[in-house]
Amino acid sequence: MTTSFTEPAASPLLHLLGQGVDLASERGVECTGELPAPSDPDLVERARAARAALGDSVFVLGHHYQRDEVIDFADVTGDSFKLAREAAARPDAEYIIFCGVHFMAESADILTTDAQQVILPDLAAGCSMADMARINQVEDAWDALVEAGVAEQTVPVTYMNSSAAIKAFTGRHGGTVCTSSNAQVALRWAFDQVGGADGEGKVLFLPDQHLGRNTAVLQLGIPLDQCVVFDPRRPGGGLTPQELRDARMILWRGHCSVHGRFSAQNVTDVRAAVPGVNVLVHPECKHEVVTAADYVGSTEYIVRQLEQSEPGSAWAIGTELNLVRRLARRFSDRQVHYLDSTVCFCSTMNRIDLPHLVWTMESLVAGRVPNRIEVDADDARWARVALDQMLALPGV
Ligand code: SF4
């Protein structure tokens, strides 16, 4: 059976992310180079020629949410964690071109050698979730935990989708980084540092409240009412010292602008429209979406589920559209649906397009290194501590 994928309607939010110039944020700055026109009919040929000229000196990483025209030139594709490891495993590649977003390129810079240079083809490719936790806000939050007398029994855990400064904060305070694939193991480890999941200890989870809540409640069995949300825009996070003392999970008020759009109504609607459909969502979705779904997991898990599925089976997938489109094409003998009827691409991911990739590679051929991502040495050192802690977790 062959089915055709129905494109969701455009969302009015589509163009709201990734605009403007903000040096202090993940969105960075606009590319100042001379970009080839997107309409240039020779773009693909120029990309091939530049890629061939650069040979093994360059390694191109492509995140699952990147556009097809970019993925076509990636040496490897994957989620942020897999790509950072792939970068670290290529010490001979002088240049790592990271087709993803800013925090991913930072992690690659931390994990690669000093002789390697990590490049982000468009410096405005940031992550709105990572921007929701600034280092000064997180330090203020820690002060609130100190004042409430709970900092000593709290371990910070930060999602990979955070700035290097936040990862460094986590390393300095004895915590770990996690990904959507290993959040359960990371949380168990963190609670073990302060008496176990049934004890009095706490985790400060940054910056995605949904991944933190879904993992704590559904995988560690922590009651929902022991999860509180720390809002950095409100004094004391909007929580009383007693609420901080009573909580087990202190969730940062951050979310993914893409996954946060899916609703429980989307799940109800697709079940009504497609009998027998399997609903498969990312753990960055809201708790009510994850509990209504059949399967939940990282992008790597989502790809694996489709690979292992039966021909003819029906799937409604709640993650970024570029990946869902590719899965629909690759598994054309399954019914693949986008969970929402409208769409919000990750527009910051989408900023990396073929003109930026061609510009980046042609600049390297000409001997210029554009858009290098370099993490401050002290942050890199402590962020590395938190990343190494994650790599040392069992099963990672
Ligand atoms: S999909 Fe969400 S978490 Fe991922 S880069 Fe985009 S905004 Fe950030």
Image: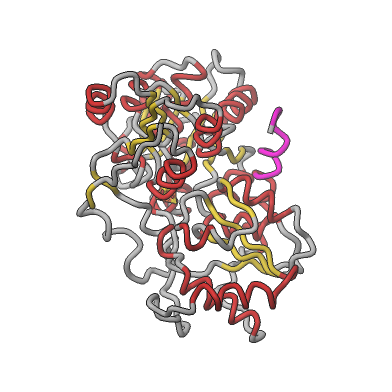
Which x, y percent locates residue 3? Answer: 36, 37
Q: Image quadrant of residue 375?
A: bottom right
Asked if residue 374 lies left or right of residue 273, the reply is right
The residue located at (42%, 41%) in the rendering is 328
Q: Eyeballing the image, is 41 above or below 332?
A: below
Number of numbered labels in the structure image: 0
Which x, y percent locates residue 147? Answer: 44, 36
Specify the quadrant that holds the C terminus: top right
Q: Nearer the viewer, residue 125 or 48?
A: 48
As drawn, the residue found furthest toward the right would be 92
Which x, y percent locates residue 63? Answer: 53, 52
Q: Range of the magenta residues?
A: 387-395
Q: Image quadrant of residue 152?
A: top right
Q: Eyeballing the image, is 368 above or below 373?
A: below
The residue located at (55%, 17%) in the rendering is 197
Q: Nearer the viewer, residue 374 or 146?
A: 374
Which x, y percent locates residue 38? Answer: 39, 75
Q: Nearer the viewer, residue 100 or 388?
A: 100
Q: Eyeballing the image, is 5 above or below 44?
A: above
390 drawn magenta = yes
